[in-house]
Image (cartoon, rainbow, N blue to C red):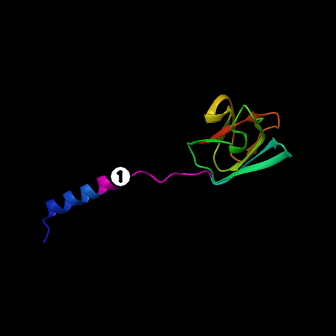
Amino acid sequence: MMRPRAMASAAACALTLLLAAPAPASAAQGDFTYAYNDANGMQYGSLMNPKSKTCITIPQVADPNSTEPAFSPNNETDKSASVYLNPDCTGSRFSLKAKSRLASRVKFRSVKFA
């Protein structure tokens, strides 16, 4: 039979381990869509339930030396987002609220969700 002090100590240790465990990665729920041009003309891309607090470089426009930036960001997720002119969330930044879109003149190569 366990003594009350030992039980309290074990419970405290278990609680400490539980609180120290990393939280699961969160994601913005919904779709983020955008347009981009390639050799075949205008195309559309999307990110479904993208990770939050992580910079995402748009794969179709990642190389500034060979592609034009994406445009017409449409944030249909439940989180706000910031789009950046350059890969790796650098350069000029524009913010989008959840469930909003920006004009086609807004160019970007990466995005980060709150």
Quadrant where the N terminus is found in the figure: bottom left
**Element under disc 1:** helix
Residue 11: give x, y in percent of width and height. Answer: 25, 60
Q: Inspect the magenta stretch and tell me whether residue 22 lies in it.
A: yes
Residue 24: give x, y in percent of width and height. Answer: 47, 54
Residue at point 86%, 46% (across, down): 40
Residue 58: give x, y in percent of width and height. Answer: 68, 42
**Towards the viewer: 6 or 86:** 86
Query: Furthest residue to the bottom?
Result: 1
Does residue 38 appear to the left or right of 65 in the view shown?
right
**Towards the viewer: 8 or 37:** 37
**Towards the viewer: 43 or 10:** 43
Say if 76 sits above or below 109 in the image.
Answer: below
Say if 96 sits above or below 29 in the image.
Answer: above
Residue 89: give x, y in percent of width and height. Answer: 62, 34
Q: As shown in the figure, which amino acid type bears the numbered disc 1?
A: Leu
Does residue 69 appear to the left or right of 51 in the view shown?
right
Q: Give the range drawn in magenta.
A: 15-28
Does residue 55 appear to the left or right of 9 in the view shown?
right
Residue at point 58%, 51% (across, down): 27
Q: Inspect the magenta stretch and tell me whether residue 47 lies in it.
A: no
The residue wearing badge 1 is 19
